[in-house]
């Protein structure tokens, strides 16, 4: 278990304790209030530890300090003996951000120019997870292509002799299919010892709009200068810092559409899994599509060529998994191996 995984578990337990407090209507017992305070203090300590370079001695001291704080009944037991110093990221691994556990508003209210597949708006409660701060770049994907000789490089998007376009190394990789993205995640997991996968569309949307359900990553008013839109090509992943999401994710609107793991169905006009979103109804079962004669997967985010209506955080699209176009890429989720799903 790493510090990031410990932080996710502590956040999750804190949410459970806060839900218990709410049921008392302001008359929660002192023991429960103390547990909530202890978990808040534990979160602060872990976040401080994440911002420093720990040694084995400091890690031992941190465990000793945390043990009395992470005590509460009927929630997931956290075994601090499993806490280890995290293996440093490989040079080509993506930077990730923690999205804390808790609810957010998914989808849109019915209205003018709001497609039915986005409605109704509903609250979803997600556990904590870690998602890419940026889409995967040409440079990061090039490491995969360099080491996996049997895998085909992107075509018609500037690659030559399995080398990415030299002037776009920091642009999102494009021309990759859903299957390519899955293969990249499997490879990156094997290389790093960490588990990477595509985000579900619920995870993607929460990271994009925050808990308040913003229309766009930056708020509820359209501001074209905050993202790459109305253009003819991609831009560097750091080109629009004013357009980051509430959690700090870049390019959640514009630049490139992004694949998610979510199954749309076999009819591009009518999704097989309407809202409210449920992760356990088959849409996140990666094997569920095997019986379909035709498969479509959900993508999110809009691209440099899309109009504002398609750049809303709740906007959805679908395409066949083998589709490879110059305005679609992906970002990844890094997860605790104990909670990993089959890729």
Image (tube, rainbow, N blue to C red):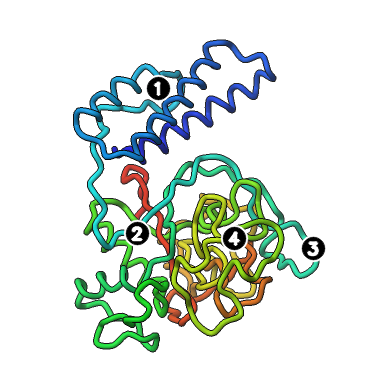
Nearer the observer: mark 2 or 4; the answer is: 2
Q: Earlier in the sequence, mark 3 or mark 4?
A: 3
> Is the residue under label 4 in contact with that under label 3 (CB below 8 Å)?
no
> Is the residue under label 4 in contact with that under label 1 (CB below 8 Å)?
no
Q: Residue at x 67, y 62 (%)?
A: 118
Residue 165 screen position, x and y as percent? 33, 82
Query: Is 100 or 225 nearer to us in this picture?
Result: 225
Q: Earlier in the sequence, mark 1 or mark 4?
A: 1
Q: Quadrant of the C terminus?
A: bottom left
Q: Residue at x 62, y 15 (%)?
A: 28
Which residue was labeled with disc 4?
Answer: 273
Q: CA distance from mark 1 to mark 3?
A: 46 Å
Image-based side of 113 in relation to 141, left or right = right
> Is the residue under label 3 in contact with that under label 1 (CB below 8 Å)?
no
Nearer the observer: mark 1 or 4; the answer is: 1
Disc on res. 94: 2
Q: Residue at x 25, y 42 (%)?
A: 86
Mark 1 packing: few (<14 Cα in 10 Å), some, or many (20+)? many
Query: Is 244 or 78 nearer to us in this picture?
Result: 244
| Residue 54 falls in image quadrant | top left
Q: Earlier in the sequence, mark 2 or mark 3?
A: 2
Q: Residue at x 42, y 71 (%)?
A: 178
Q: Residue furthest top?
A: 30
Q: Earlier in the sequence, mark 1 or mark 3?
A: 1
Disc on res. 111: 3
Q: CA distance from mark 1 to mark 4?
A: 39 Å
Q: CA distance from mark 3 to mark 4?
A: 21 Å
Residue 79 screen position, x and y as percent? 31, 27
Nearer the observer: mark 2 or 3; the answer is: 2
Badge 4 element:
loop
Disc on res. 191: none
């Amino acid at each position: 278990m790493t510090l990031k995984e410990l932080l996710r578990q502590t956040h999750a337990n804190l949410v459970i304790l806060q839900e218990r407090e709410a049921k008392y209507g302001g008359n929660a017992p002192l023991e429960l209030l103390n547990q909530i305070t202890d978990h808040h203090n534990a979160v602060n300590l872990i976040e401080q530890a994440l911002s420093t370079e720990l040694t084995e001695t400091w890690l031992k001291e941190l465990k000793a300090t945390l043990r009395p704080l992470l005590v509460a009944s009927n929630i997931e037991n956290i075994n601090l003996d499993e806490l280890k110093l995290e293996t440093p990221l490989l040079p080509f691994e993506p930077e990730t951000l923690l999205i804390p556990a808790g609810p957010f508003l998914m989808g849109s209210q019915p209205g003018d120019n709001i497609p039915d597949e986005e409605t109704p708006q509903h609250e979803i409660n997600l556990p904590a997870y870690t998602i890419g701060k940026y889409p995967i770049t040409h440079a990061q994907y090039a490491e995969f292509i360099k080491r996996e000789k049997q895998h085909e490089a992107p075509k018609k998007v500037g690659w030559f002799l399995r080398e990415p376009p030299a002037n776009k190394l920091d642009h999102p990789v494009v021309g990759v299919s859903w299957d390519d993205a899955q293969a990249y995640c499997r490879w990156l997991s094997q290389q790093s010892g960490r588990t990477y996968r595509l985000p579900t569309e619920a995870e993607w949307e929460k990271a994009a709009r925050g808990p308040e359900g913003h229309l766009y990553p930056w708020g509820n008013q359209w501001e074209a200068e905050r993202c790459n839109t109305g253009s003819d090509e991609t831009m560097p992943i750091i080109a629009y810092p004013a357009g980051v999401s509430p959690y700090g994710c870049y390019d959640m609107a514009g630049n490139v559409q992004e694949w998610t793991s979510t199954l749309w169905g076999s009819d591009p006009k009518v999704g097989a899994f309407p809202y409210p979103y449920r992760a356990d109804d088959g849409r996140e079962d990666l094997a569920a599509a095997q019986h379909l004669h035709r498969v479509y997967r959900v993508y999110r985010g809009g691209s440099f060529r899309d109009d504002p209506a398609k750049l809303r955080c709740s906007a959805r699209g679908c395409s066949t998994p083998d589709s490879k176009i110059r305005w679609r890429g992906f970002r990844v989720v890094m997860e605790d191996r104990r909670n990993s799903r089959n890729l």
